[in-house]
Amino acid sequence: MTALHTPKAPDIIKSNTIKIAAAMICNDQGKVLLVRKRGTSFFMQAGGKIEQGEDPLVTLERELQEELSFVIVEEDCRYLGKFSAKAANEENAMVEAEIYHIKSNLKVTAQSEIEQLIWIDPRNLGSLKVAPLTRKLLEADVMT
Ligand SMILES: Nc1nc2c([nH]c(=O)n2[C@@H]2O[C@H](COP(=O)(O)OP(=O)(O)OP(=O)(O)O)[C@@H](O)[C@H]2O)c(=O)[nH]1
C-alpha cells in the first residue's frame, strides 16, 4: 500500500508563500509612500513578485518603474532585510519580502495597476487600512 503524505502546516504555508521585493520609500519630512493596487483595499509598499531566479533589486527596479515611473538611484537605496507577514490580498498565504529603504523627495505619480498612492506619517496611521507586512515594518521603525 502506498503511504499517503498529508502535508503538515509548515509545508502548506511554504507552498503558499509569495516572494516579493518591495520598497520603504521615505522623504525628508519622515513620510512613507504607500500604494493601493487597483481593485484592492489595503495600502502597502510599492513592489511586486520576484520571478524565478531573479535578483530582488532587479525586481524592484522593474516594479517601481511600472508602478510609479520611479528610477532607483543606487546611493539612495539600502537593503533592510527579509520580512514576512500574512499576505494582504490572498487567502491563507504568507508574503516574504526583500525590503529596500529608498530616500526620495521626488514627486511620484501612480501608473498602471496603482489606483492610489499616499504619503503617510508612520506614527499616525489613524484608521488607514494597511497590509500586515506594512504594519510590521512601520512598527519595527525601519524608516530611517
Ligand atoms: N507589492 C506588495 N505586495 C504585498 C505587500 N504586502 C503583501 O501582503 N503583499 C502581497 O503580495 C502580493 C504581490 O502581488 P503584486 O500584485 O504586488 O505583484 P505583481 O505586481 O508582481 O503581480 P502580477 O505581476 O502577478 O500582477 C499582493 O497581492 C499582496 O497580497 C506589500 O507591501 N507590497
Image: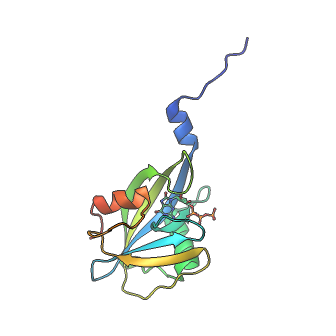
Residue with the most extreme bottom position? 107
Residue 52, given in percent of the width and then of the height, sits at 62, 55
Residue 108, given in percent of the width and then of the height, sits at 47, 85
Residue 102 or residue 27, whichever sits in front: 27
Q: Quadrant of the C terminus?
A: bottom left
* Residue at the spot 57% in from the left edge and 45% down from the top edge: 16
* Residue at the spot 35% in from the left edge and 56% down from the top edge: 136
Res 83 → quadrant: bottom left
Residue 17, given in percent of the width and then of the height, sits at 54, 47
Residue with the most extreme right position? 1
68 is higher (above) or lower (below) than 59: below
Res 75 → quadrant: bottom left
* Residue at the spot 42% in from the left edge and 51% down from the top edge: 84
Split into quadrants, the picture shows ligand 1 in the one at bottom right
Residue 100 or residue 18, whichever sits in front: 18
Please, which colouring scheme is shown?
rainbow
131 is higher (above) or lower (below) than 76: above
Residue with the most extreme top position? 1
* Residue at the spot 29% in from the left edge and 59% down from the top edge: 139
Residue with the most extreme front position? 127
Q: Quadrant of the N terminus?
A: top right
Res 134 → quadrant: bottom left
Q: Count up the numbered dots.
A: 0
